[in-house]
Image: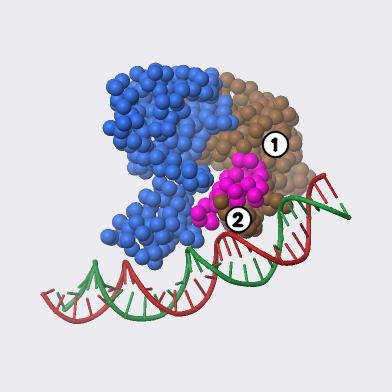
Chain colours: A brown, B blue, C green, D red
Amino acid sequence: MLKAERQQVILNEVRIHNRVLFTDIADLLSVSVDTIRRDITELSVAKKLKKVHGGAISLGFNNYQVENQEIYALENKSRIARKAITLIKSGQVILISGGTTNMEIARMIPPNLKITCFTPSLPVAVQLMSKSEVDVILVGGKLSKDSQIAIGGCAINMLNDIKVDICFLGINSIDVKNGVTDFDWDIVQIKKAMINASKKIVAPSISEKLNSTQRFKICDLDKIDVLITELEPEDDKLKAFREVNLKLL
Amino acid sequence: MLKAERQQVILNEVRIHNRVLFTDIADLLSVSVDTIRRDITELSVAKKLKKVHGGAISLGFNNYQVENQEIYALENKSRIARKAITLIKSGQVILISGGTTNMEIARMIPPNLKITCFTPSLPVAVQLMSKSEVDVILVGGKLSKDSQIAIGGCAINMLNDIKVDICFLGINSIDVKNGVTDFDWDIVQIKKAMINASKKIVAPSISEKLNSTQRFKICDLDKIDVLITELEPEDDKLKAFREVNLKLL
DNA sequence: TTTATTATCGCAATATATTGCAAAAAACAG
DNA sequence: CTGTTTTTTGCAATATATTGCGATAATAAA
């Protein structure tokens, strides 16, 4: 068995069970514990999981990036995710769109938080499947190859039938004057439907996306209840948003 | 043997088994390990696969496979998948449920085959996303944590609205007398709806699942148009199925 | 504390990678 | 067709990587 294979198996186990024991994996793959230990040390150095005494545990966030640039952005996104999660109360029904920031939110949902989660995003659904306390409800429809989100009439119909507590709306561009905008017509339609389906709209967005505008409008700023960025709410860059009485986090 | 041929073989092996060993391929093609190493280095540079110490692995990150036992079953399943794919014609609309055999079918759909594919299965959908010529339409609904399939009224409603050319129905148990059966009530409902939504039902099943029965009935054998196993259609083990005029592949 | 489990280190056996080179095969120009 | 050039292939020598094991240290648990 190849080393790379073993490491994939380990990562997969961690993904599913949130933790592994050296002894279990060694047994499973019929290699020595030392080998597994070394594998996990490597994976740990590569920041794919966290090595602990006796085994390894899931990182809670990570994996798909290589470049420094992206790792840096990830830090911001997981900071946003940490804030976002404080808004979720046990027992609530939430709706979450796609995007890497929302992936982070999905990933960081604590394992004991009992919620129902609607999503049209394939990667988010996959992520949420590992949370045993989260009921995942997939919003069906034609999958966009780019965004990996269900789009089209079917998805919108399904969204029209629900009313959830909170919606985490992935943001591509947000601007005080032009509101929330996006460049993909199909996704704009889905996001509009998501807004309609929710009592409270939360917009998680890294600060780079502030003050930019795309071709199509999703909604005005007054539809947004909370804007979450990686910055402190008092930050100068958020001045314009504070002035229109947008709640910041 | 031409270099290009060899590389084709290598890619194919990787696609089927998710990994190859230099030594295996060298043996298989009767060339030196160095040659294979050089081939794989080239393919790796071309980003067709990932070279690792001792061999190469598939680029896809949805690789699940653990024990030798399971790899062996995988061989049977990919044999089934190969046969199943011959039933699909370009331009058709198909419906595919979950299960590892169906995952194999999804994985082995050739990259140039232009089809529309409905599925309530999360892993199958993920798999299909990498096929640029396949339109993927997700059947939405509550996701079952066990089977990673959308279940419940919403999914069934959506299935009631469609009529596809072929359905690949994941099989848990199939028996001449009791027909197709399963142990999960929710999945039974989905599969019934899938059968209703299809003109032609194909049942891919490894031979181990033949002649077994579970608690809940999905349909009688006469609903099934084609049964695919890893065996030759003339195999003795399939005698009972031949006698009821079930088409075998 | 004591005890059992897990970590770490060094080492040896084996497997794999790399390099340079020469023979064979293919491509090509005259 | 012939001789030359380029590519491909196999091989050998050497370097590097991987793995399992034993001895000992560190850590967690009772």
Q: Mark 2 highlights which residue?
A: A32
State which chain disc 2 sits on. A
Q: Chain of mark 1?
A: A
In the displayed structure, A245 sits above or below D27; it is above
Q: Is residue A92 left or right of residue B214?
A: right
Percent of width and height locating residue A3: 54, 56
Give above or below for C7 relative to A167: below
Task: Note whether residue B81 is visible.
Answer: yes
Q: Residue at x 47, y 51 (%)?
A: B59
Residue drawn at 27 percent across, 60 percent down: B1
Q: Quadrant of residue B226?
A: top left
On whether disc 1 and disc 2 are found on a single subunit, the reply is: yes
Q: Amino acid at mark 1?
A: Pro
Secondary structure beneath disc 2? loop
Identify the mark at residue A218; answer none if there is no mark: none
Expressed as whole percent of the image width and height from the top left, the position of residue A60 reads 67, 44
Q: Which residue shows up at 66% across the image and 48% down it?
A: A21
The residue shown at (65%, 42%) is: A18
| Magenta residue check for A68 | no
Percent position (x, y) of residue D7?
31, 69
Q: Residue under label 1, please give it.
A: A111
Q: Main secondary structure of the magenta part?
A: helix
**Horizontal side of residue D24 vs B244, given as left or right:** right
Q: Is residue A238 above or below residue A113?
A: below
| Depth order, front residue of A129/A206 | A129
Q: Determine the secondary structure under disc 1.
A: loop
Say if mark 1 contacts mark 2, CB within 8 Å: no
Q: Residues within 10 Å of mark 2 (few under 14, many from 20)?
A: few
The stretch in magenta equals A1-29
Amino acid type, label 2: Ser
* Image spot of residue A147 (x, y percent): 51, 40
